[in-house]
Amino acid sequence: ARLLQEKQARFIVEQDRTRITTKEKDVQLSEEEESARLARRNLTRLAEEKEKVSLIKEDQARLAEVARRQEARLKLEEETRMKNTKAESEQMQVAFKKPLASLAVNMLKHKDPP
């Protein structure tokens, strides 16, 4: 009877150990599942952030191109304005020189002889 009780006691102890081990494994498994879930969520967030960064870079590239084109257009407009101003200035000089030249010719023509 005593031997039977010891066997039963060992069996109960072994069952308790098995139950504890099983519970520990269940806890470990659920922690691993939670960790995996968090890792998946973090990966999803990272992918979303990467996409946002990519879109921002594309926008920046487009804006840089627009700025470059505007700068080129403004430079061209300024060059055109300078050429037009120079041409107008030359035309004004010619316009002033013609009357001066004809005035000088007229003065020489009508100059009283000495």
Image (cartoon, rainbow, N blue to C red):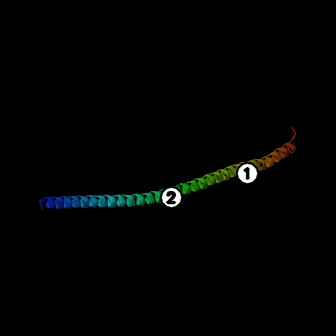
Q: Is 110 left, or right, of 38 in this rendering?
A: right
Q: In the picture, residue 114 is in which quadrant?
A: top right
Residue 58, image x and y in percent?
A: 56, 56
Q: Foreground residue, 110 or 67?
A: 67
Foreground of the two, 17 or 88: 17
Q: Nearer the viewer, mark 2 or mark 1?
A: 2
Under circle 1, the secondary element is helix
Left or right of 17? Residue 86 is right
Q: At which x and y percent is residue 55?
A: 53, 58
Amino acid residing under circle 2: Glu
- Residue at 60 percent of width and 56 percent of height: 66
Q: Position of residue 16 (x, y in %)?
A: 21, 60
In the image, farthest residue toward the left: 2
Please give left or right for residue 50 compared with residue 74 in the image: left
For label 2, the residue is 51
- For label 1, the residue is 88
Measure how far apart labels 2 and 1 are at the Cα level.
Answer: 55 Å
Q: Earlier in the sequence, mark 2 or mark 1?
A: 2
Which amino acid does the dot numbered 1 rest on?
Glu
